Image (cartoon, rainbow, N blue to C red):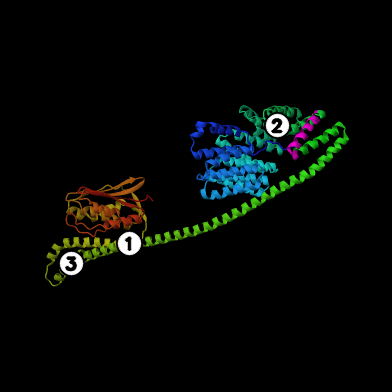
Amino acid sequence: MAVIAFLLPTDFHAQQNSEKDSLLSVYYDTNSYGQLSNNKKIDLLNELANVYRFRNPDSIKFFVDKSLELNENKVYKGGYMETLIRYGDYYSDSGFNTRAKKKYDQADSLSKTIQDPKRDVFLLKSLALHNMFVGDLREMIGSTYEAIKICQEEQFSKQEALLRHNLGWLYSNNKLYNEARTEFIIADSIFGMLGDASRRASTRSNMSYNALQTKDFDAYKKYAEDLKSYFKNHGETLWYSRACRITSLYHQLIDDPENALHWLKKSDSALMLVNNPRDYAEILGLYNNIYFDLENYETSKEYNIETIALTKKLKDSAKLLDAYRIRNKIELALGDSNEALRYYELVENLENSFAENTEGKNIKFLRAKLEFDTQQEIENQRVAAELEKKDLWIFIMVLFALGFVIIAYLIRKNFLTQKEATQQLEQLVRDKDKVFAVISHDLRSPITTLQELLKLYKAKGISEKEIARFTPRLKENVDHSSFMLNNLLYWSESQMQGFTTTKSPVNVKKVANEICKLFQEALEKKCIEIKCNIDQNLMLNIDPEHLNIVLRNLISNAIKFSQLNGTINFDSKIIDNHPAIYVCDDGIGMGASQLKAFHQRDSIDSTPGTSKEKGLGIGLSICQDLIAKNGGELFVDSNKNKGSCFWFTLPDK
């Protein structure tokens, strides 16, 4: 199969006509051009030189000479760098490879001082094409991928797409159709994202041809869809001719010569409006094949004669070889064995030299790609090793920082623990001092009084009648001392964490009645009425001794802080399916500091009762601890001079 001429890099695209015309209109418009700054003029001239690439080398030189005249002192370094690139393009297109390389090298040296990524891409793109023309394929591949990398970093999407398209063209020319398809797809998606319909259509045209090389007809149909109408509607005559030619080639491949001829004639008709001998040589060659398939050997021979003449003129060995092959078949079909033999020998001679050159070129290209891929892999491994080393250092630093944070946390935690322990110890010391003060006075006084009284009685210094008179008072003091002593014992146990809990079902009403009897004398003394409204069937799962101590302390406090003729309510309720026991009074209530101490589980400073009753200030703390040990919680609602209400809840089982 002949290689179709329109599989070309994007620099060859016909849509550059519109770009060229637009730039030329500015250049030839005296007013528009005159209003441009000097730097803008230089950029315009360099861009005009660029659009004449592969069209007219003399035009390239004309515009870069003009650009250099405006930048003779080289003040505009970016513009001068691009001028050097375009000079390189001119020499490369003209076949002066040494001069071209010198200009590119000068531009490369300048690029290191101005740091202009966009012009770096221009340089690498021109270098890639130049290296392809001189056969340095490894450098060509390297330059292309380096330019693509810059485009990705700087988000030069259009330039990346152009580079991808050119790379796809090169891969397809060297029969790396899968690689070509990958690059074409990337270029197509970028052009689509940019909304560049013209370049996208050209890319898809080349993609459709690339698909035909592997007979992937589904991909061909996908990419070729609507291309002919697009090119025709947008005046892209050359590309319309090529799209028709691809359709003709497709019909040849599926053995449909009639439709193949139909589309080839449309391609030929469109090409008459364009002077492009290489495309016309392609059309002539396709006429050879189609008329031969239609068994119209005479017409096929006429086109073949014209094809041979034109391909010789163009020095296109590939198309000339195809023409010799089909001519051999034509002569055999016409029965001219001598001519058939002559063209067979021509095929043999040309095929040997051409195949050798073609295979050598393909092998060289594959070797260059392999070397580039290998070098790229080595570079990737080096970068990965550096990143791994960097990650190791980062991990070590993070580990060190984490260790420092942990140590700092432990030091602070230890400091806070010591501080808390110190505060607890200071509180214990205060409580100890308070306890010893109580022991030395409140507990010692009744015992001392009893001791003195018994001493007098023994010495006959007091009569039994006088002892009987002191007995109620002594009993009251001893009972009070006994109550405080029991509280002290339980408080001591709580501080030493020596509580043990033995739960069992307890009838609360029965315990409450016993406690009310226990405090009957104290209630009568202050004329306090106690209302015990506890449900007689209420059972609590609690340590009986703990319940006794809690209720005794709550009733004792209620009596202590109630006024004469006060009222105490001893009640039970169900809250959220849990039983609750209430002890409420209408006494003097609690102050803010006392409530704060209660909620923080601190001991409360002892306050004398309404009749100067004394206490330790540890009763409520004992109640909180005992209730908590049994799985419940003690609450309070108190207002100064309005009374207090204490209640606790326990699990129902």
Q: Considering only order in the chain, which callout, 3 or 2, is on the residue closer to the N terminus?
A: 2
Q: Which residues are magenta?
A: 299-318
Element type where label 2 sits in the image: helix
Q: Which mark is residue 450?
A: 3
Q: Which residue in the structure is indicated by mark 1? A: 419
Q: Is residue 614 left or right of residue 258?
A: left
Answer yes or no: is residue 299 visible: yes
Q: Residue at x 70, y 49 (%)?
A: 364
Mark 1 surroundings: few (<14), some (14-19) or many (≥20) residues within 10 A: few
Above or below, 137 relative to 411: above
Tell me the kind of residue under disc 2: Arg
Element type where label 1 sits in the image: helix
Above or below, 12 relative to 505: above
Q: Residue at x 34, y 45 (%)?
A: 575
Report how many numbered discs are placed on residues in the image.
3
Q: Which quadrant does the N terminus fall into?
A: top right
Q: CA distance from mark 1 to mark 2?
A: 92 Å
Mark 2 surroundings: few (<14), some (14-19) or many (≥20) residues within 10 A: many
Displayed quadrant of residue 518? bottom left
In the image, residue 337 lies at what x, y percent?
A: 88, 35
Element type where label 3 sits in the image: helix
Q: Which residue in the structure is indicated by mark 2? A: 245
Tell me the kind of residue under disc 3: Leu
